[in-house]
Image: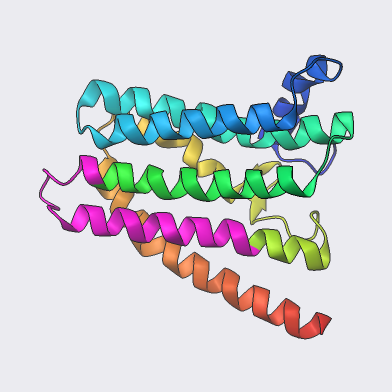
Amino acid sequence: MIDKPLDARLAYRLVYPLRNSRITPNHLTSVRLLFGILAAAGLSTGDYFWINIGALCFVISNFLDHSDGELARLTGKMSKSGHYFDLASDAIVNIILFIGIGTGLMHSQLGFWALFMGMLSGLAVAGIYFMRNEIEKFIGKSDARQPNIGIIEAEDVLYLLPLVTLMGWLIPFLILATAGAPVFALWTLKEYREIRIKQS
């Protein structure tokens, strides 16, 4: 567990008692997807209370994203179908999260642009996850880790979403995501293409 990020370590401890239970990795993926949908729904309302509930749901969803893989490795219940279900859930949650944020901000000064920005950010983040997964296939999980500081990875910034919603910072958050996510996606695409060329 030395090379694991912090949330993966915590997820391992959480699912360890479940190793001999009837709970499967796909069950956890389903719960992760459900909380992701609830997060997007809450954020899409534009209501301060439900926005914050949505942000908390997203934190739970994001954390559970690690738990299914940890349980699969613990129990040996790894499968291609489970892996693809996990990937699909990642894409769905990230896309609808930002669409939810954009929808909730359509009544702000951003207007209709908020929805466009949410869609662009969500697609970019989903693309990053997909490409990093493909990179892992070529060079291995440990070598394909995201930029990190020790056991804290770049994606862990999303755990700050409840702070963002509490402070009313969703507009600058969406603006930064719209500017940064596509750039990072292009950088990841460049890395992916270079690795494919080296491996071919």
Location of residue 86 with respect to 7 vertically, above or below: below
Q: Is residue 115 left or right of residue 79?
A: left
Q: Which residue lies furthest to the right in this view?
A: 76
- Quadrant location of the C terminus in the rendered image: bottom right
The one of 110 and 40 positioned closer to us in this rendering: 40
Magenta stretch: residue 120 in it?
yes
Location of residue 29 with respect to 183 vertically, above or below: above
**Residue at left 58%, top 73%?**
189
Q: In this view, does 200 lie to the left or right of 114?
A: right
Looking at the rendering, the stretch of residues picked out in magenta corresponds to 103-131
The quadrant holding residue 151 is top right
Q: Residue furthest front?
A: 81
**Residue at left 45%, top 61%?**
124
Q: Is residue 100 left or right of residue 75?
A: left
Q: Position of residue 5 (x, y in %)?
A: 71, 40
- Quadrant location of the N terminus in the rendered image: top right
Our reading of the magenta stretch's main secondary structure is helix
The quadrant holding residue 32 is top right
The quadrant holding residue 89 is top right
Magenta stretch: residue 4 in it?
no
Snapshot colouring: rainbow
Q: Position of residue 148 (x, y in %)?
A: 65, 51
Location of residue 129 with respect to 189 vertically, above or below: above
Q: Position of residue 110 (x, y in %)?
A: 15, 53
Number of dots carrying numbers: 0
Q: In this view, does 166 lie to the left or right of 105?
A: right
**Residue at left 55%, top 35%?**
62
